[in-house]
């Protein structure tokens, strides 16, 4: 069975490489046509997608998935409409392939241009969220890349239904159907094969929990865009506006607890801990959040004392840690110790304090007076995202179509020779 899977994966890789060569020269209009046609097909077939998702949801409930994980898996007509909107938004964006990043002339007479070029073949390994099938397929296509998608077993039927619409879009635009392939097995051997397919896959993007990302980082021979945990912090400074702070923290934690941009730890300046800080914690407790708090907060109603390992956790649930800190420097020290360099926010009206926070931390996304739930490619205007890259090489933050390109140099002379 393992040999059979390996053979199938290598065949997918070969076909993806051939499709990538076609996509590298595909007109921007054809790619846009494919994405718009895919959106039309997905909307037309939305009842079939919802039915497939219902079967996935029933199986996931039997397995005992948490409410947050079930929320990530669930599709309804509203969410399918959002996926269609994302496909159309990506279609309408400027095509990154061939864009001139910079250009210059040399005294030798050479003209040199650095231009965007596709990466080639992208492998995406993801869990739970069927919208990733559409987002990853769309962004890779826009950037001229072929993609091999390997979704988790919990979304198997939903992923297939969405993938079918993407293939219809490719067919309508006359582009190779192998440009967006979906692995047909839930056997984990397929993941191992993808991580070793250095001749056929140019980069791997893992999208899932710590276990999946850790596995990919440990075992991949193919380069990886790391999407690590979203251990997002919010620091409330002494200069914070009370109304803004209460609204932003509540939204950052409770809007959707199961996404990587959900706030997981609240840091309160010592001077406001018993005033505004107590109000914010009361708001969270009233919203059903289990608050695990450090010293200086344990007298507040409805909270529990935090254990040492409650900090540095990605809960993806209605659970939040909280601590009192002396100032912005202490907040940054806490974030450096426990954070994941994903998204961290400060609530402050003092410009100097906010500037220090922005300069002193190296998270992929830093926010001021805004909810961490905005850590999303769609909210950044990218149409969609293939993930939030927390590494420092090539791509950081939301990975859209532009981040799925590399570059090459185009050098033009006129019979120019080197002395």
Image: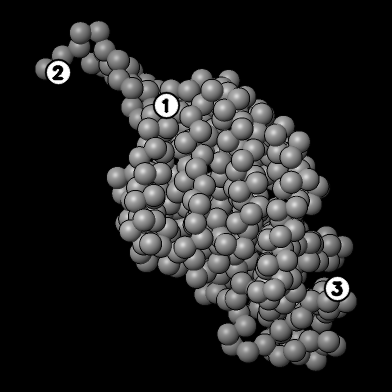
Q: Residues within 10 Å of mark 1 (few under 14, many from 20)?
A: some
Please give the residue where the numbered disc 3 appears in the rendered image. Answer: 287
> Which residue is nearer to you in this view: 237 or 251?
251
Lateral position of residue 223 relative to residue 305, left or right: left
Please give the residue where the numbered disc 1 appears in the rendered image. Answer: 22
Front position among marks 3 and 2: 3
Q: Secondary structure at mark 3?
A: loop
Q: Residue at x 85, y 88 (%)?
A: 301
User: How many marks on residues?
Assistant: 3
Extreme-left residue of the structure: 419
Please give the residue where the numbered disc 2 appears in the rendered image. Answer: 418
Does the image show residue 253? yes
Does the image show residue 396? no
Which x, y percent locates residue 82?
75, 44
Earlier sequence position, callout 1 versus callout 2? 1
Q: Secondary structure at mark 1?
A: helix
Mark 3 touching mark 1, by CB under 8 A? no
For the residues marked 3 and 2, what is the alpha-carbon distance in whole angstroms?
Answer: 71 Å
Earlier sequence position, callout 3 versus callout 1? 1
Front position among marks 1 and 2: 1
Which x, y percent locates residue 274?
82, 82
Vertical placement of 9 versus 324: above or below? above
For the residues marked 3 and 1, what is the alpha-carbon distance in whole angstroms?
Answer: 52 Å
């Amino acid at each position: 069975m393992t040999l059979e899977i390996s053979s199938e994966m290598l065949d997918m890789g070969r076909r993806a490489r051939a499709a990538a060569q076609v996509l590298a020269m595909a007109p921007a209009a054809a790619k846009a046509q494919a994405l718009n046609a895919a959106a039309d097909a997905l909307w037309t077939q939305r009842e079939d997608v919802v039915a497939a998702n219902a079967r996935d949801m029933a199986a996931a409930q039997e397995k005992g998935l948490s409410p947050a994980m079930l929320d990530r898996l669930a599709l309804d007509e509203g969410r399918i409409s959002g996926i269609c909107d994302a496909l159309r938004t990506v279609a309408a964006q400027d095509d990154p392939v061939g864009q001139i990043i910079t250009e210059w002339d040399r005294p030798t007479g050479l003209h040199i241009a650095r231009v965007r070029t596709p990466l080639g073949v992208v492998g995406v390994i993801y869990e739970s969220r069927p919208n990733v099938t559409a987002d990853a397929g769309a962004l890779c296509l826009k950037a001229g890349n072929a993609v091999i998608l390997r979704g988790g077993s919990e979304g198997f039927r939903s992923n297939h239904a969405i993938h079918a619409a993407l293939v219809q879009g490719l067919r309508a635009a006359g582009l190779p159907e192998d440009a967006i392939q979906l692995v047909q097995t839930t056997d984990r051997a397929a993941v191992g094969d993808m991580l070793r397919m250095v001749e056929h896959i140019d980069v791997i993007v893992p999208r899932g929990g710590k276990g999946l990302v850790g596995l990919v980082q440990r075992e991949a021979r193919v380069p990886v865009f790391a999407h690590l945990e979203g251990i997002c912090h919010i620091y409330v400074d002494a200069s914070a506006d009370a109304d803004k702070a209460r609204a932003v923290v509540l939204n950052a934690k409770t809007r959707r607890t199961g996404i990587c941009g959900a706030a997981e730890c609240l840091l309160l300046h010592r001077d406001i801990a018993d005033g505004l800080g107590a109000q914010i914690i009361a708001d969270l407790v009233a919203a059903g959040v289990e608050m695990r708090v450090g010293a200086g907060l344990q007298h507040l109603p409805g909270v529990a004392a935090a254990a040492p390992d409650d900090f540095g956790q990605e809960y993806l649930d209605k659970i939040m840690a909280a601590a009192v800190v002396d100032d912005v420097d202490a907040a940054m020290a806490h974030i450096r110790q426990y954070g994941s360099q994903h998204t961290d926010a400060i609530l402050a009206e003092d410009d100097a304090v906010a500037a220090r926070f922005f300069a002193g931390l190296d998270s992929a996304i830093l926010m001021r007076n805004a909810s961490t739930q905005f850590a999303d490619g769609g909210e950044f205007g990218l149409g969609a995202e293939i993930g939030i890259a927390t590494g420092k090489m090539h791509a950081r933050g939301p990975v859209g179509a532009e981040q799925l390109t590399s570059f090459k140099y185009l050098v033009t002379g006129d019979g120019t020779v080197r002395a």
